[in-house]
Image (cartoon, rainbow, N blue to C red):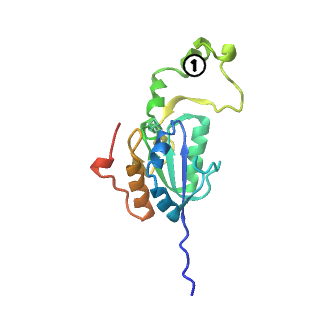
């Protein structure tokens, strides 16, 4: 009799207004990636270059919301992922990109495109293909429900691994003191 093969979990990841540092941290799990791909497969992710998120068990989001496309991608993840995890300071509270929040978007764009040397033409790009910037950078929990948060800039690979393996095993994720970081 053939033993039924347990289907692999599906994981998706994306970077919104982030620097990919949290994804670099994810890769710090090193050879445990081989253990991970025994248990799960990646859907949309910079690791796969798949462009849209299909139905998934776990979604990991790096980065906050600085433009309309970020909001669209976040909603796509929420609609498709059973469990959504905010990874890193930018996703949780806006992080470094939110430093612009004390300035108006008009001031930011004018300052960059009208006063910086070396920018061709010195005009503010307005191609309709470009995503519209939001007036302020927002943390992702302001737009969709987030199930778990992994703090840090970036969180360590150990912390990401702990949360992932807890979720895969069906446990409530539990970051001990040493894995919680806020810088
Ligand atoms: Fe980069 Fe830090 Fe933001 Fe992660 S939390 S995307 S490492 S700036």
Q: Is residue 183 above or below residue 27?
A: above
Numbered label tally: 1
Q: Is residue 3 above or below residue 90?
A: below
Frontmost residue, 120 versus 127? 120
- Residue 114 found in image quarter: top right
Per the image, the residue denoted by label 1 is 106
Q: Residue furthest right?
A: 128
Frontmost residue, 143 versus 97? 97
Regarding ligand 1, which quadrant of the image does it lie in?
A: top left
Q: Residue at x 60, y 49 (%)?
A: 76
Q: Residue at x 29, y 52 (%)?
A: 176
Q: Residue at x 49, y 56 (%)?
A: 33
Frontmost residue, 77 versus 155? 155
Q: Residue at x 50, y 37 (%)?
A: 64
- Residue 106 found in image quarter: top right
Is 49 placed left or right of 170 in the picture?
A: right
């Amino acid at each position: 009799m053939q033993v039924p093969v347990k289907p692999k979990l599906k994981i998706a990841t994306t970077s919104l207004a982030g620097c990919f540092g949290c994804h670099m941290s994810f890769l710090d799990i090193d050879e445990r990636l081989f253990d991970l791909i025994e248990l799960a497969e990646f859907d949309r992710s910079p690791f796969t270059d798949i462009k849209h998120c299909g139905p998934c068990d776990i979604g990991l989001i790096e980065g906050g919301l600085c433009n309309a496309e970020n909001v669209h991608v976040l909603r796509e993840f929420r609609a498709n992922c059973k469990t959504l995890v905010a990874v890193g300071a930018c996703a949780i509270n806006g992080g470094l990109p939110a430093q612009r929040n004390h300035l108006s978007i008009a001031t930011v764009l004018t300052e960059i495109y009208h006063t910086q040397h070396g920018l061709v033409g010195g005009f503010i790009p307005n191609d309709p293909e470009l995503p519209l910037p939001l007036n302020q950078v927002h943390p992702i929990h302001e737009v969709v429900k987030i199930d778990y948060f992994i703090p840090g800039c970036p969180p360590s690979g150990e912390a990401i691994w702990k949360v992932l393996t807890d979720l895969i095993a069906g446990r409530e994720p539990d970051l001990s003191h040493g894995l919680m970081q806020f810088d």
